[in-house]
Amino acid sequence: KAGVTQTPRYLIKTRGQQVTLSCSPISGHRSVSWYQQTPGQGLQFLFEYFSETQRNKGNFPGRFSGRQFSNSRSEMNVSTLELGDSALYLCASSTGLAQGGTGELFFGEGSRLTVL
Amino acid sequence: DAKTTQPNSMESNEEEPVHLPCNHSTISGTDYIHWYRQLPSQGPEYVIHGLTSNVNNRMASLAIAEDRKSSTLILHRATLRDAAVYYCILRHLSGGYQKVTFGIGTKLQVIP
């Protein structure tokens, strides 16, 4: 069973540019959630998509957006990049079904973004 | 949202048991306690979860306090491969949707 695939693994951008990151979940999983990981803040929740709908959103500015396609693949976009956006962006997939919080999250290896 | 508190770092000798604590004093009755770990240069991976009773699996054991305000992840014999950041998180239903809040994690160093 293939795992969660994130592309690209590494990228470098300059301030003011925008970036799009992609996440392919495990086959059959309908939920994709995104996280930003920085040394000082740890893992912070960005948003979660389930069946093409955003179900929940963390406390990030509107520059951070996402979407999910009918095949459950998800993309996140960051516009007008700032230096502070440099981070490891992780996505996780799960069945997304309301199982009383028991569902396991499967993470990808992340996309490391550097903003110069 | 209910939050978790963990020590920033811990050390353990190889082949000795490790007890990783987590405080979640504002846990609600429908919150499950999950543990994940993140090995260097990898995404987090699931370790174990529980609701009220202690749980065991091939990787670890989870001991949950009777009042559920704290829990402890137990690695019975630490190996060098267990050196990682361990996250204690609560998974709950919020407004009908699942929402995950991660703690800062505990960096476990295993000493040979």
Image: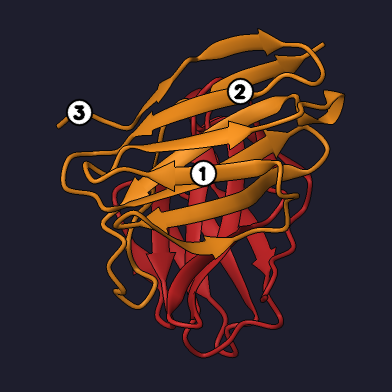
The picture places residue B20, in percent across and down from the top left corner, at 62, 54
The amino acid type, in three-letter code, at marker 2 is Val
> Given the image, what chain letter belongs to the residue carrying mark 1?
A
Judge whether residue A87 can be spotted in this image: yes
Side (left or right) of B92 relative to B107: left
The amino acid type, in three-letter code, at marker 3 is Ala
- Which chain's colour is red? B
Residue at the disc numbered 3 = A2
Sooner in the amino-acid sequence: mark 2 or mark 1:
2
Q: In terms of image quadrants, where is residue B51?
A: bottom left
Label 3, label 2: how far apart the Cα atoms are: 25 Å
> Given the image, what chain letter belongs to the residue carrying mark 3?
A
Circle 2 Cα neighbour tier, 10 Å, few/some/many (<14 / 14–19 / ≥20): some
Side (left or right) of A5 relative to B72: left
Q: Which mark is residue A19?
A: 2
Residue situated in front as seen by the camera: A74 or B25: A74
At 59% from the left edge and 60% from the top edge, which residue is drawn?
A57
Name the secondary structure under disc 2: strand
